[in-house]
């Protein structure tokens, strides 16, 4: 076993190499457990509170283990941070020569074969500056080594051209491709196969596990260990990857590639025009029925009352199957055979979704002005995820700051199907929450269902923001509440010169990272956000000293996934509130509250406006899941606390009720 105490100790290499380094017992404890798990090829679940230093606690044993390790993260931001900063720093500090590779999914790499097709096949009616971006891509393709489209900032993630210059598993012809020798995807895979440490994200890891289940080759190299950071995201992501999806965009790309394949074989591009037109007509019928039942940009449940949708899907299934058969009849080589296979796969996916019974999963519809998506999400991914873990004989380490509900791992373990053979370790944050933070539950708040609730939240928030001099996050559980609060605050803080009393940063009005950058720079800004700001946001120092949360973050009862899962648990004789809704909400609240204290120097107040925190019995579950902050219902006490922070006071005098 690797002994890590000396490395993390006061005279160890980390103390010598890192300015301001301070040994933490919690970090050493986690590192020792990770090292033991790597050595035994065991399984470990670690909840490490904010400030533990969990990243170094798993990276140090990883680098010392000598094995081949996959580290998977929840976001590309953390993925890039590990690759560009943390791992190279530790490798130098520990004197370990390790080959490190960053591996992303296919959609992040340029497909040279698709880029080199005739420009007419890539044109996008001039939208989004497509012609200029195409020219830029051609120039860049001659000099890039990685082919990572992140090197081309003009091509945003959502730009429609992106799908036309990248490949999917279905559209890639592999070694048969004329550009295979220069393929960026396979070059990245080859490099990863030879690396000691491969850094991926959960999307890629789960996609690889799902493909392995289907009998395809691994995207990721065989590994001695798999470490999953931000593991709290895994259950919901696994449901997506183990589910079935069908999108109109997939059909559009198939027809585009079919046109290119017909040209390549010397057949007239209109050889299958009748069959293609029938597919397009059937696709349009489905799109029309989806648009009737799903609001643009939103996700809706696919119920038995979705009039006309089943019939439209049945027609599209028939036409896709007919197209696949006619392509095969041409006997036109590998390119056409691949298109036939894709048409058949799309036909099968749509048939599975449309024909799914009530107990098989949640069926959803999503509609945008150009496209639609249909999904079937399984209710229980645990058995399948556990089977995939069992099939890979490696050490598995799952870690996050938010895995337990009321101090117990049971909910997370059940959702991923992990059993008693998984060791668990819960490490509290080293921060002094009792003196650094105060939890305030305002008195006199109406029920969250009241139409006046958001107005009352703003009323409670304004004097608190004044006392803190800005530096506040206002976190909401819905866009409607956020928009209402933004309107009220703009009126409340309007000044004679046309400026607002505090810089007001509202989610949706600028990119997320730009909002956060401005928040840090201003020092007195007020940021309004919904779910994407409840986690993965790190603002240290005096810029953030007040976090106000409007409601306990129960999933909306009309959310199709929640509603279907609730009905399924009830049909199975379970208690959906206690087994699913309450623990999920407790974990989400834990994430939101965790935005406030990010370092030993941070101080501030968390305000939870939902009266159910104190009036309902289940409020105890939420409170038991939060850090040990002092609690109060006295507004004057909170105002004094915030005023002292603004005045630079170093101590608090509040008392817990």
Image (spheres, grey):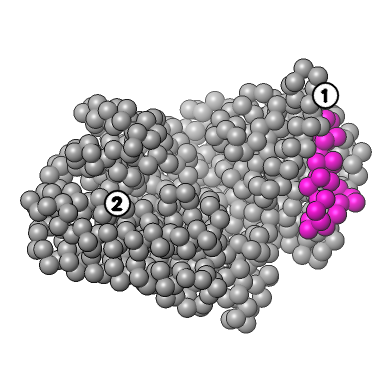
Q: Which residues are drawn in magenta?
A: 441-467
Residue 314 in picture, x, y percent from top left:
37, 72
Report helix, strand or loop for mark 1: loop
Residue at 42%, 52% (x, y): give it: 371
Q: Residue at x 50, y 64 (%)?
A: 364
Q: Which residue is mark 2?
A: 253
The residue closer to the viewer here, 458 or 267, is 267
Residue 177 seen in render:
yes
Q: How many marks?
A: 2
Q: Residues within 10 Å of mark 2 (few under 14, many from 20)?
A: some
Residue 162 image point, x, y percent: 34, 41
Q: Position of residue 108 (x, y in %)?
A: 34, 42
Q: Quadrant of residue 492?
A: top right
Q: In the rendering, which numbered label is found on residue 647?
A: 1
Residue at the far left in the pictured view: 266
Q: Position of residue 89 (x, y in %)?
A: 43, 32
Relative placement, left or right, of 90 versus 100 is: right
Q: Nearer the viewer, residue 471 or 173?
A: 173
Secondary-structure class at tag 2: helix
Instruction: Look at discs 1 and 2 and give the one toward the viewer.
Output: 2
C-alpha gap between disc 1 and disc 2: 60 Å
Residue 13 forms part of the magenta stretch: no
């Amino acid at each position: 076993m690797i002994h890590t105490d000396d490395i993390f100790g006061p005279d160890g290499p980390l103390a010598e190499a890192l300015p301001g380094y301070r040994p933490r017992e919690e970090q050493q404890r986690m590192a020792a457990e990770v090292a033991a798990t790597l050595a035994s090829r065991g399984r470990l679940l670690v909840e490490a509170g904010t400030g533990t230093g969990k990243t170094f606690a798993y990276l140090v044993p990883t680098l010392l283990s000598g094995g081949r390790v996959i580290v998977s993260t929840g976001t590309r931001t953390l993925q890039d941070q590990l690759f560009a900063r943390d791992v190279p720093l530790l490798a130098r500090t520990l004197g370990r020569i390790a080959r490190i590779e960053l591996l992303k999914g296919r959609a992040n790499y340029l497909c040279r074969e698709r880029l080199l097709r005739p420009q007419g096949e890539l044109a996008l009616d001039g939208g989004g500056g497509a012609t200029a971006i195409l020219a830029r891509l051609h120039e860049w393709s001659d000099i890039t080594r990685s082919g990572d489209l992140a090197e081309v900032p003009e091509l945003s993630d959502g730009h429609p051209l992106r799908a036309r210059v990248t490949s999917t598993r279905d559209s890639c012809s592999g070694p048969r491709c004329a550009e295979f020798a220069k393929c960026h995807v396979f070059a990245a895979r080859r490099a990863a196969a030879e690396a000691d440490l491969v850094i991926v994200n959960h999307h890629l890891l789960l996609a690889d596990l799902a493909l392995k289940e289907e009998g395809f080759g691994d995207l990721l190299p065989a590994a001695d260990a798999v470490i999953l950071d931000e593991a709290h995201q895994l259950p919901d992501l696994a449901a997506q990857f183990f589910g079935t999806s069908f999108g109109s965009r997939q059909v559009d790309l198939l027809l585009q590639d079919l046109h290119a394949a017909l040209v390549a074989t010397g057949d007239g591009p209109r050889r299958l025009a009748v069959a293609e037109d029938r597919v397009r007509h059937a696709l349009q019928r489905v799109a029309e029925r989806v648009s009737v039942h799903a609001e643009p940009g939103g996700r809706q449940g696919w119920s038995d009352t979705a009039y006309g949708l089943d019939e439209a899907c049945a027609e599209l299934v028939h036409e896709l199957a007919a197209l696949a058969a006619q392509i095969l009849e041409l006997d036109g080589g590998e390119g056409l055979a691949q298109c036939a296979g894709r048409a058949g796969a799309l036909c099968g996916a749509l048939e599975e979704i449309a024909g799914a019974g009530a107990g098989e999963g949640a069926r959803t519809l999503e509609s945008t002005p150009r496209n639609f998506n249909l999904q079937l999400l399984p209710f229980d991914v645990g058995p399948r995820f556990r089977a995939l873990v069992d099939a890979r004989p490696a050490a598995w380490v799952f870690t996050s700051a938010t895995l337990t509900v009321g101090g117990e791992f049971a909910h997370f373990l059940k959702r991923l199907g992990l059993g008693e053979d998984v060791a668990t370790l819960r490490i509290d944050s080293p921060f002094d929450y009792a003196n650094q933070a105060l939890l305030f539950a305002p008195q006199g708040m109406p029920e969250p269902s009241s139409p006046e609730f958001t107005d009352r939240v703003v009323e409670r928030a304004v004097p608190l923001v004044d006392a803190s001099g800005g530096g506040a996050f206002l976190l909401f559980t819905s866009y409607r509440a956020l928009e209402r609060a933004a309107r009220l605050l703009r009126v409340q803080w309007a000044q004679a010169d046309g400026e607002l009393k505090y810089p007001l940063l509202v989610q949706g009005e600028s990119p997320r990272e730009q909002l956060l950058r401005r928040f840090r720079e201003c020092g007195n800004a007020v940021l309004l956000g919904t779910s994407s700001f409840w986690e993965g946001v790190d603002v240290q120092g005096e810029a953030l000293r007040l976090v106000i949360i409007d409601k306990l973050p129960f999933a909306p009862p009309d959310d199709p996934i929640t509603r279907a899962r609730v009905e399924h648990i009830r049909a199975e004789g379970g208690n959906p509130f206690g087994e699913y809704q309450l623990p999920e909400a407790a974990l989400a609240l834990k994430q939101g509250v965790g935005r406030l204290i990010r370092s030993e120097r941070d101080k501030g107040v968390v305000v939870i406006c939902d009266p159910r925190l104190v009036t309902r019995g289940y409020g105890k579950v939420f409170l038991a899941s939060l850090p040990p902050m002092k609690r109060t219902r006295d507004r004057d006490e909170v105002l004094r606390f915030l005023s002292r922070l603004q005045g630079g006071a170093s101590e608090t005098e509040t008392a817990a009720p």
